[in-house]
Image (spheres, grey):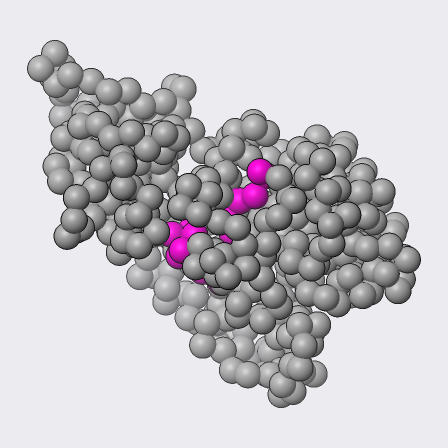
Amino acid sequence: MPILLKNASYIDWKNLTFMNANILINSELDNSISFIDLSAYSPDKKEVEILDCKGKLVTKSFALGHHHVYSALARGMGVPKKTPSNFHEILKYIWWTLDKSLDKEMIKASAYVTAIACAKNGVTFAIDHHASPNAIEGSLDIIAKAFDEVGVSHLLCYEITDRDGNKFAEKGLAETENYLKNNQGLVGLHAAFTVGEKTLKNAVDLADKYQSGIHIHVAEDHYDQEFSEKTYNKRVVERLKEDGVLCFEKTILGHCLHIDEFERDLIANSDAWIVQNTDSNLNNNVGYFNSDGLGENIMLGTDGMHSNMLQSARSAFFVGQGFDNIGYQGIYERFRNVHRYLAGNDFKGDGENNLVILDYDSPTEINEDNFLGHFIFGIENRHITDVISNGRFILKDKKIVNVNEEEILGFSRQQSLRLWERMSKANYY
């Protein structure tokens, strides 16, 4: 059923022009929206769902460039038996312990609560990078099903790695290929220091076979570079370039914190994209993103820390004042660049009929001349009242529409206790 948003203050997400509009949203045909004159249009309430948006802002919904469903049940978990002293140990003692403890029920719970969190934060499209070494087969389908039910579009991949041996790398490759046969997706790789030459080549070949791209963490910590130079006598980005990772327009390089001028030039002269994850970098104390020499293909993600893209943009802007060259327009462009990535690569699910409605109680005037100041310093996720994904409501009056949130939260709490119990029996946790 089409949706009519009456009396809206519509903000064009591309040029930030404001207009008072009545917006008719198509759910099936061409993913479009149209602006209509109500004096010449008398909608039948049985055929059109009508929402009065007087006093509210309506604009394109948000998309998330790098997420981790697998981390959704980590909130509130205990501390590891051994305190990590560096980032490699953070991975080893915490995140690799967690992902190895996941089973299919835990993945299911993680996927549902992540999709719900996305919807409540105005995110209608998420790019996810998943890991569950002891529950690989079918994991991407579990995540896709949950996201589809909530109504959040997605671009998924499994994190292929040699860190648990060749057998697990082969399982990751098989899961990826099985998923790509019937779904849009990427070929995921963990950080390069956990990916050997054979697995890297197989991943690139798989991406080429399915006309996809590689989604990989790059130089998130100094350790990635140190390992690459010691093992391969070359830096990480140089290795990825030589093995074909940068050749794909769909390739996403996560983090890119510890790269030199030569590597920056390699990325800038490639078709690859970078995704910045400021909150995660701050949490892990691994360093600060600097965009110098990297070109324009930079978007924002959360790295599994949360699903709030407004917060990600704000963090990137504030931290960037000391470590990056970023202004009001620049941070908004990074916030919206994920749409350019998706559209440029013909991924489905991010059409113009994806909208967010904001009840923004600003104490000052907001218009197209000062919108960016409100975007950085004012608009928050608490202002989101309704979200439309692919022409259908997935959040209405701040309530999830398509699934029972209360039941899912009860299920996820049960699964979190199971997960933490498993982790407590591991070597490091």
- Judged from this view, the residue extending furthest toward the top is 40
The quadrant in which residue 341 appears is top right
Q: Residue at x 53, y 44 (%)?
A: 299
Query: In this rendering, is residue 365 above or below 304?
Result: above
* Viewer can see residue 105: no
The quadrant in which residue 232 appears is bottom right
Query: In this rendering, is residue 374 above or below 48?
Result: below
Q: Residue at x 18, y 40 (%)?
A: 56
Q: Relative to residue 231, is residue 308 drawn left or right?
A: left
Give the image location of residue 203, x and y in percent: 78, 44
Magenta range: 296-314
Give the image location of residue 323, x and y in percent: 55, 59
The residue nearer to you, when weighing 41 against 409, is 41
Magenta-colored stretch includes residue 303: yes
Magenta-colored stretch includes residue 219: no
The residue nearer to you, when weighing 297 against 428, is 297
* Viewer can see residue 409: yes
Give the image location of residue 82, x and y in percent: 65, 87
